[in-house]
Image (cartoon, rainbow, N blue to C red):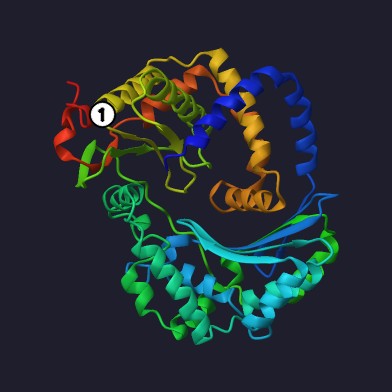
Amino acid sequence: MYRVTGSIRFRIFLLLTIAFLPAYAAQAQATAAATANITEFDVNGMKVLIKRRPGTPTVSAGLFFRGGVTNTTAANAGIENFTLNAATEGSKSFPRQELRKETSRVGTVIGAGSSYDYSALSLTSTKGSFEDSWRIFVDVALNPSFAPEYVERVRDGLLTSLRSQSDSPEGALETLHGKIVLAGHPYADGPEGTVENITRFKAADLAAYHRTLLHTSRMLLVIVGDVEPSALQKQITASFGGLPRGTYKDPALPSLSFAKPSLDITSRPVQTNYVKGTFAAPSIREPDYYAMRTAVTILQSQVFQEVRVKRNLSYAPNAELDEHAANTASISVSSVDPNEAVKIMMGEIRNLQQGSADEDTIGQMAGFFLTTHYLKLETNAAQAADLAQYELIGGGWRRSLEFIDRMRNVTPAQVQAAAKKYMTNLRFVVVGDPKELDRSIFVPAATP
């Protein structure tokens, strides 16, 4: 969470984009033309997106499962992540030893992961080995063996991660954030699950849950690389066309509650106090997202300048915007003087709410976003993930092509309105010494 590199990169990119803004317009046009090479079709209810990128040496695929934590409850939280990771250990046609041998031979990587909003199995291979890698990937996705030794191997890794979550102050802060800010929301039962759940699940439980995933109505397949969509369509239909369609519908996801500000502290003998203040934010499918992203990026720059550069109160103060369906943003800092650091950060929020972002500042943001946008999407895997994110929670994959234009059209009035609307009623969590905190700074009295 406390990323020095993120803040430093921001400042470097901002300087670069100011210097090279004219060249970015041509680059944006070229990229827009390239991203138009997207083919969409349906395989028995499963949407498939194929983006052709001529000349790229790798091919990346992601098989995504809709719903994320809304598919589970507190009683079985973590089972989806456990199931998909155990699936990558070995399948019926490719036991673990053979799977490792074959993927190593051709340099293929098969992985799995889960988030609040969706989960995925992923594949990256060279173009030349894609056909062989596809056969392995499909067998892992459809016919995992869930052999006891595979399940135990994955269980050990998951339990180690869960048990070490609060070992560091940063981890303890995120744990506290989950308990306080996410309480009562589907996100409270995180995709990683609990020690109790992961310990309890048996191989048969994973196999049974896996069967519920294989309904095409809850699946999305995205492939990016130098591939021919018409040829791939036949392979995909042969692989997945026989699955049941099911009746999956995305459930309505409530917003997180920010009705009033709050402060929750975990006492811990640390040298500095670790602070995170969370506030509401629009998701990527909402019109306010672009103004809010601009606002948070300006806030990130300002808190870095004011808290670190000018006053040396913290090494890595930060502001960031998440990318969840029920979205949030936050400010964070680790400081020996948390009261002063947070007072300054709250002051920068008030500046945005009072209209401090002018046309010049926002114009610089457009160049910054263009630079970071293309850097983020350099790989085929990143482009597959971006298309999937917009398709699953962003209102459709076509909106991913609108990002730069929407960012360019943000106005100072929109940034001010977003700051006023969302940057209120911050919910603070702190790991450190309660005696060092002035509560009135974190939870100010209501204005009459």
- Report whether residue 408 is seen: no
**Left or right: 122 as drawn, with respect to 357:** right
Please name whichever residue, 231 or 318, is drawn nearer the observer in this view of the structure: 318
Please name whichever residue, 37 or 295, is drawn nearer the observer in this view of the structure: 295
Say which residue appears at 81% left-offset and 54% top-offset.
57
Please name whichever residue, 398 or 440, is drawn nearer the observer in this view of the structure: 440
| Image coords of residue 264 (percent x, y) | 21, 43
Looking at the rendering, in which quadrant would you find the C terminus? top left
Please name whichever residue, 312 or 320, is drawn nearer the observer in this view of the structure: 312
**Image quadrant of residue 270?**
top left
Label 1: how many residues lie within 10 Å, few (<14), some (14-19) or many (20+)?
some
- Report whether residue 422 is seen: yes
Identify the residue position indicated by label 1 in the image. Answer: 337
**Image quadrant of residue 367?**
top right
**Image quadrant of residue 337?**
top left
Q: Examine the rendered structure and indicate whether residue 10 appears above or below residue 359.
A: below
Say which residue appears at 34% left-offset and 49% top-offset.
174
- Number of marks: 1
| Image coords of residue 144 (percent x, y) | 59, 80
| Image coords of residue 121 (percent x, y) | 60, 66
- Of the residues shown, which amino acid type is indicated by label 1? Asp
In the image as oriented, which residue stretches furthest toward the front?
A: 271
Say which residue appears at 31% left-offset and 51% top-offset.
172
SS assignment at label 1: loop
